[in-house]
């Protein structure tokens, strides 16, 4: 991925390597916040916001501290700590400075504190050995991919309430089946970039 | 290893430091109660309450926008804790309760297309949930699934039933129901509701002037829940013992069963449960909202005044009833005779009303002992004027004031006082041998039936029109016929004849015949020239109608002068639902607003006035909503024919045999037995707006 252009990175992260449907990270909010379109959109926005920030900060930490001091094996725990603090910080900041945005994203921020999609995207950026700008773009792409998948899924789930679902399959079960089918659909993007 | 340790320590310290600085720099003052409230919530961030997460809900609670019970996941104990943080005592705040407004239930299959969908939301989205009934319950139980307190279940009849002990009033069911059937209301809100065009109500309930939820109480009787039935009736009518005895039940005229069969005997069922409560010897507890500290004066303790006082008290106001007579009840005490409504029964009923915390000042008359100005001066926030219609109309013919001539109300009231008051024992009423009562209303019939019991030899009624037009209750006319009263129809009195001593000896009248129908379609009686006839009598009672006695207006030097009256001396109020007079803080209702009418109409008016007074003194808009039904019927609910009704006999009213009852004043009509009540309640079709229970049909 490091040799790709920005455009390819975006296509790759949104569609081909969709964090939810190809990497299967962040399944918990995927199922949890997809029952209503409204919540899905809120969650998607919050993830875009946090992931771009987290992507850049973790890149800096990794390349400025972990690599020079030969501490690469501390990557996971360091990233978790940084991301969690970052989200808390953003929450405090928004509450004071941009209350309107806080009111919209408020409840989703704490949910992202420990979201594996965010951590996963940061780790992938590092693994793919992207430069700072590219990792920024890639983070953004992953987040948009998350949003696209979540919103699509929420749309489908809203429709499913209108359908005739056998009792044992109702709710989460049919959600998982649907997720699988959507993932299969995304599979067709494989090999595009 | 050391570097790793140092690095982690450094990173942790930096993060911690940054956060603590940030929390200082970006500090926003937050009411400490928010955190405390939030700590009692379930921390599930489920947004089930409608707010974006627990902290948003906590903010809303502290801001007073959400009730302490907002959290749909936390239990009742948590709600109590939150209430404690907020300093509201969960015991005094009026609880919100969910209740279901549609009893369509298992008839839903007749009303909607079911295609294997199992959510109300889905059905409503796909088909508008509509087939026959635009507003009914779909019965698929979205509300049941939404309730995390397990307070709802789909009952045996296919509609949601609320367990009031478990419901915390969180409103989850109301939000989820696509047909707006579940409503979360406090008792006060329920008491204030007036029937509306978009309500799901049976024809009988639409027609009842007091708007009682008839199918609900009949269903409760059917299930053996007599106390529940009493409570249901008491949400609309505090005088069910009296109504159960004297009401001419206009509701039964619109009963859906009555279209194909005999109507359900609604009123006897009411009397049955009312008597059940009385015979149990205990007044069932009545819920009263927390006190508002507002004072209302109710002038007149008749049905209208009692009903207004009762509902105002239940809404939390302090009420005092001022009445000119020694005891409460108005016309139903001093007009309606003992054999129809035993005064012991009435006293038990009015005691129950006073028991909820209403003050009664007897023997004080507006215009003689006080005026409205003095009430305002003593701090009353509003006044209800329910002085009834106590002034008899007169014939306007010669000789009306001869000895042995009385007017209906005076005769009945004097007799009632003589019977009831120790102080009046020496004023035994005069009773003639050949008595004539002029008039065709309840007053006239009560006079003749009283005279028969007092031993008059010959009693007859003289009425201008025919029997069909008599406004008296049908059962009363029949009873009078059985008891031997003679009727002279189509006769207009022209002169009362007396002897030298000034005592009445005869009544001259003109015979009438029915002429051309007038604008209202009734054939007016017209006199036949030269048909004067003289009837020999020694006692005459004129009972041709009454109007309010508004002498207080002339007596008063103050405010009362601005009170507008109509040309019938009734108190003028522009809107018969709002019942506000020309003086904004004076409200009226019952006979004093409409002229002589029915007990149940006065009770309905009392509640409507209570609603207006409540809104007035709490500073809200009084004007009733445009869609207020007010004695009209909802067209879709009135059928021409009803399918599949199998005829079943209506329960007969048990009564004393004629020979026993004409000798005494003991109650003539008796209560039906429990088996009969169960049988009769089973005849009810449990109608809703358009559907009904075909199984019992
Ligand atoms: C003989 C008779 C038989 C009836 N039979 C039936 C029947 O079978 N079924 C039926 O539904 N209806 C019947 N009615 C009608 C029914 O009784 C009345 O419609 C009903 O009582 C009206 O209630 P109200 O509260 O408006 O007035 P009322 O019952 O007349 O009460 C008015 C109250 O105001 C008090 N009052 C009056 N003036 C003053 C004043 N200046 N100061 C203080 N207090 C005052 C009176 O003492 C009385 O307590 C009958 C009426 C009569 C007269
Ligand atoms: S009340 Fe509403 S949500 Fe409940 S079963 Fe009926 S239609 Fe469905
Ligand atoms: S019945 Fe309705 S209001 Fe009552 S607890 Fe259940 S969901 Fe809440
Ligand atoms: S059948 Fe029952 S619910 Fe229907 S109109 Fe008659 S009394 Fe009312």
Image (tube, coloured by chain):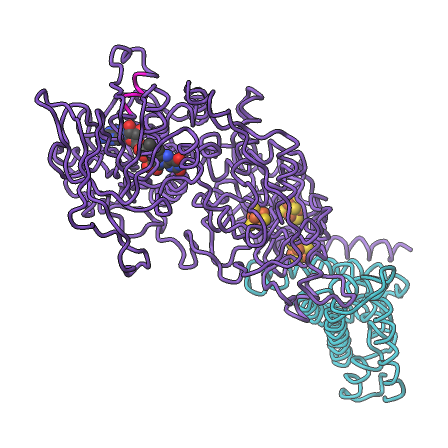
**Quarter occupied by residue A122:** bottom right
Q: Nearer the viewer, residue B624 or A127?
A: B624
Q: Nearer the viewer, residue B278 or B138?
A: B278
**Magenta stretch in the rendered image:** B413-418
Image quarter where ligand 2 lies:
bottom right
Which residue ends up furthest to the left in the rendered image?
B500
Q: Is residue A168 left or right of residue B203?
A: right
**Quarter occupied by residue B52:** bottom right
Inspect this view and state whether residue B60 appears: no
Q: Is residue A160 left or right of residue B370?
A: right
Q: Is residue A183 magenta?
A: no
- Chain A's shade in the image? cyan
Inspect this view and state whether residue B506 appears: yes
The answer to whether residue B8 is above or below residue B592 is: below
The answer to whether residue B286 is above or below residue B511 is: above
Task: Name the spot of residue B68 as percent of width and height, x first.
Answer: 58, 42
Looking at the rendered structure, the number of numbered marks drawn on it comes to: 0
Task: Name the spot of residue A132 as percent of width and height, x first.
Answer: 76, 78
Q: Is residue B417 magenta?
A: yes
Task: Name the spot of residue B101 as percent of width and height, x first.
Answer: 58, 51
- State which quarter of the image contains the N terminus of chain B: bottom right
From the image, give the main secondary structure of the stretch colored magenta: helix
Task: Name the spot of residue B141 as percent of width and height, x first.
Answer: 71, 54
The purple-coloured chain is labelled B
Report the residue at 50% width, 35% height from top.
Answer: B234
Q: Nearer the viewer, residue B583 or B253?
A: B253
């Amino acid at each position: 991925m490091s040799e790709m252009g920005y455009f390819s990175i975006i296509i790759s992260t949104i569609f081909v390597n969709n964090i939810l449907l190809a990497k299967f990270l962040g399944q918990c909010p995927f199922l949890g916040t997809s029952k209503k379109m409204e919540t899905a959109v809120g969650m998607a926005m919050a993830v875009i916001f946090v992931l771009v920030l987290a992507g850049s900060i973790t890149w800096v930490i990794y390349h400025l501290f972990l690599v020079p001091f030969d501490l690469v094996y501390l990557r996971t725990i360091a990233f978790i700590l940084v991301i969690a603090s970052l989200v808390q910080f953003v929450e405090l900041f928004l509450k004071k400075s941009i209350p309107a945005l806080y009111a919209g994203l408020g409840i989703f921020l704490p949910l992202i504190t420990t979201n594996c999609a965010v951590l996963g995207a940061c780790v992938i950026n590092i693994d793919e050995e992207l430069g700072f700008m590219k990792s920024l773009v890639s983070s953004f792409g992953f987040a948009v991919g998350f949003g696209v998948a979540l919103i699509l899924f929420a749309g489908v789930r809203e429709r499913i309430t209108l359908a005739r679902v056998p009792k044992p399959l109702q709710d989460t079960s049919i959600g998982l089946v649907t997720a699988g089918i959507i993932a299969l659909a995304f599979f067709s993007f494989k090999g595009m970039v | 290893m050391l570097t790793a340790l140092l690095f982690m320590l450094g990173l942790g310290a930096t993060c911690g430091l940054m956060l603590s600085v940030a929390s200082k720099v970006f500090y926003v003052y937050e009411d400490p109660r928010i955190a405390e409230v939030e700590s009692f919530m379930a921390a599930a961030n489920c947004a089930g309450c409608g707010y974006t997460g627990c902290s948003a809900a906590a903010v809303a609670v502290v801001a007073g926008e959400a009730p302490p019970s907002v959290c749909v996941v936390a239990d009742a104990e948590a709600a109590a804790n939150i209430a404690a943080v907020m300093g509201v005592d969960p015991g005094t705040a009026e609880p919100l309760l969910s209740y279901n407004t549609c009893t369509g239930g298992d008839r839903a299959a007749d009303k909607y297309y079911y295609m294997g969908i199992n959510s109300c939301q889905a059905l409503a989205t796909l088909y508008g949930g509509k087939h026959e009934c635009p507003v009914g319950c779909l019965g698929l139980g979205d509300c049941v699934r939404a309730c995390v307190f397990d307070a709802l279940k789909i009952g045996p009849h296919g509609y949601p039933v609320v367990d009031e002990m478990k419901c915390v009033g969180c409103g989850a069911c109301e939000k989820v129901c696509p047909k707006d059937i579940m409503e979360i209301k406090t008792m006060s809100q329920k008491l204030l509701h007036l029937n509306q065009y978009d309500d799901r109500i049976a024809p009988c309930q639409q027609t009842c002037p007091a708007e009682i939820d008839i199918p609900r109480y009949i269903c409760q009787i059917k299930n053996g829940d007599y106390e529940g039935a009493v409570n249901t009736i008491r949400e609309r009518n505090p005088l069910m013992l009296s109504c159960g005895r004297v009401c001419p039940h206009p509701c039964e005229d619109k009963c859906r069963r009555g279209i194909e069969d005999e109507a359900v005997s609604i009123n006897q069922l009411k009397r049955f449960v009312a008597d059940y409560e009385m015979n149990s010897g205990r007044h069932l507890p009545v819920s009263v909202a927390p006190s508002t500290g507002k004072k209302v004066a109710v002038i007149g303790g008749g049905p209208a005044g009692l009903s207004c006082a009762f509902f105002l008290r239940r809404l939390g106001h302090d009420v005092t009833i001022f009445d000119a007579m020694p005891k409460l009840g108005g016309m139903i005490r001093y007009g309606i005779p003992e054999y129809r409504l035993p005064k012991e029964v009435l006293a038990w009923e009015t005691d129950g009303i006073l028991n909820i915390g209403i003050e009664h000042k007897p023997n004080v008359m507006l215009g003689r002992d006080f005026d409205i100005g003095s009430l305002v001066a003593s701090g009353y926030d509003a006044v209800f004027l329910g002085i009834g219609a106590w002034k008899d109309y007169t014939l306007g013919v010669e000789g009306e004031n001869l000895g042995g001539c009385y007017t209906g109300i005076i005769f009945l009231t004097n007799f009632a006082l003589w019977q009831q008051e120790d102080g009046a024992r020496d004023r035994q009423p005069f009773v003639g041998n050949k008595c004539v009562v002029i008039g065709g209303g309840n007053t006239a019939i009560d006079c003749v039936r009283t005279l028969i019991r007092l031993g008059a030899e010959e009693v007859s009624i003289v009425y201008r029109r025919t029997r069909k037009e008599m406004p008296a209750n049908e059962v009363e006319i029949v009873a009078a016929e059985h008891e031997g009263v003679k009727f002279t129809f189509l006769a207009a009195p022209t002169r009362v004849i007396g002897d030298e001593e000034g005592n009445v000896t005869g009544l001259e009248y003109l015979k009438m015949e029915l002429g051309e129908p007038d604008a209202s379609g009734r054939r007016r009686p017209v006199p036949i020239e030269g048909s004067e006839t003289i009837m020999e009598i020694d006692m005459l009672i004129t009972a041709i109608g009454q109007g309010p006695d508004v002498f207080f207006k002339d007596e008063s030097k103050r405010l009362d002068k601005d009170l507008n009256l109509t040309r019938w001396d009734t108190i003028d109020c522009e809107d018969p639902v709002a019942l506000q007079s020309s003086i904004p803080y004076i409200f009226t209702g019952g006979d004093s607003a409409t002229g002589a009418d029915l007990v149940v109409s006065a009770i309905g008016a009392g509640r409507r006035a209570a609603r207006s007074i409540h809104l007035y003194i709490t500073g809200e808009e009084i004007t009733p909503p445009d869609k207020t039904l007010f004695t009209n019927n909802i067209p879709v609910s009135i059928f021409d024919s009803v399918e599949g009704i199998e005829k079943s006999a209506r329960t007969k009213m048990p009564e004393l045999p004629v020979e026993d009852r004409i000798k005494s004043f003991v109650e003539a009509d008796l209560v039906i037995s429990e088996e009969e009540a169960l049988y009769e309640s089973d005849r009810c079709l449990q109608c809703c707006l358009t559907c009904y229970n075909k199984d019992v049909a």
